Amino acid sequence: MSTKRYAAAQSTTLDVQGVVLHYQVQGTGPVLLLSQSGEGDADRTVDLVPHLADAFTVVTYDRRGLSRSRLDEPQRTATLVEHADDVRHILAAVTDEPALMLGCSFGAVVGLHAALRHPGLIGTLIAHEPVAPRLLPEAERLAHERELAGLVKLYETEGLRAVLPEIARAVGIDPSGADAEPGLTPQPLDADRLANFDRFIRHDFAAILDDTLDPGRIASLGPAGTRVVPAAGLTTPRTVFDYRCAEALAELTGSECRFLPGGHNGNTSHPRAYAARLRQILGAEVEAGTGTGTGTQGEGGAEAAA
């Protein structure tokens, strides 16, 4: 299968086990899948994609349960393994070559699972501040798992208005957006986004707390597997949990942690500068031959905990 050129964004659905996935494709060049953070759907990076689409075939999607990716059982929590399998299904529909992937926050953990579960699927994964407590030493892991469980409880008892500032504090987000680039597309808290936040806090937090990610297997990916590039925001406080996870991933993989403009949500707050830095990193990967290659995705190598 050759990758087509998509001058304008093309929206498609894919019927897989338990969900009809919505995804969008735009651009030309090596396939780059964006897996979003938080409540973000395929439209979350509407300001970022145009700055990438001349060099990459950019794929964005609604995670199962968000926006247009409708679940057969809406009240069931999807596991990170299921999210990783969704990545495989989407990429298989777009290309038969190893893809590039940017995973942000929750999306970075999805990417790590996809790399472990489906060898050959992803050539290079930029894992930007993965919310993965299992990367941390036990005492730190347990403390942050309690913190996440407390955020869920706060949401259930006091609602979104009470919990959003606490989520921002936990991951080091400046809610004022004072240093954001000008001219950003408004992202109001409309009914769809409120529903996505509900899904994210009630179900994706649970998936993080129940995660089975094995740090030892990440360390063993090696040069023949997915190249994992740990990343963090330039302005993310160095003491917060997501930055500590990026640091731990860098130590685990023996890789330098790369820094991108903005903080935890730099892909949305600084889309032009973020895209330029992303192009630098991914361009070097493609040029070196470590980003993408030919061939089809492997189906084996299921995680021990799957």
Image (tube, rainbow, N blue to C red):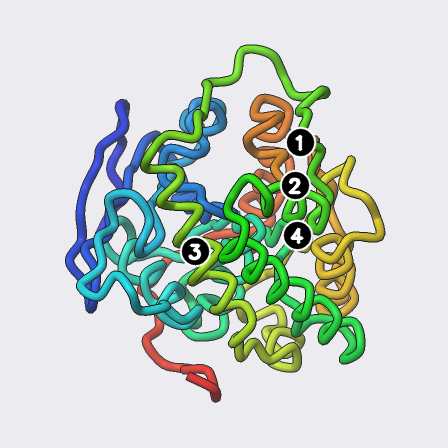
For marks 4 and 3, give the CA distance.
26 Å
Residue wearing tag 4: 129
Residue wearing tag 3: 293
For residue 50, what is the image quadrant? top left
For marks 2 and 3, the one nearer the N-term is 2
Residue wearing tag 1: 175
Residue at left offset 78%, top offset 53%: 240
For marks 2 and 1, the one nearer the N-term is 2
Amino acid type of the residue tagged 3 in the rendering: Gly
For residue 169, what is the image quadrant? top right
For marks 3 and 1, the one nearer the N-term is 1
User: Disc 4 or disc 1, which is closer to the eye?
Assistant: 1
Residue wearing tag 2: 165
For marks 4 and 1, the one nearer the N-term is 4
Residues at circles 2 and 1 in contact by the CB criterion of under 8 Å: yes
Q: Is residue 178 left or right of residue 84?
A: right
The spot of residue 196 in percent (x, y) is 38, 45
Residue at left offset 45%, top offset 49%: 35
Amino acid type of the residue tagged 4 in the rendering: Glu
Residue at left offset 54%, top offset 11%: 183
Instruction: Give SS at disc 2.
Output: helix
Residues at circles 2 and 4 in contact by the CB criterion of under 8 Å: no
For residue 191, what is the image quadrant? top left
Amino acid type of the residue tagged 1 in the rendering: Pro
For marks 2 and 4, the one nearer the N-term is 4
The spot of residue 297 in percent (x, y) is 34, 66
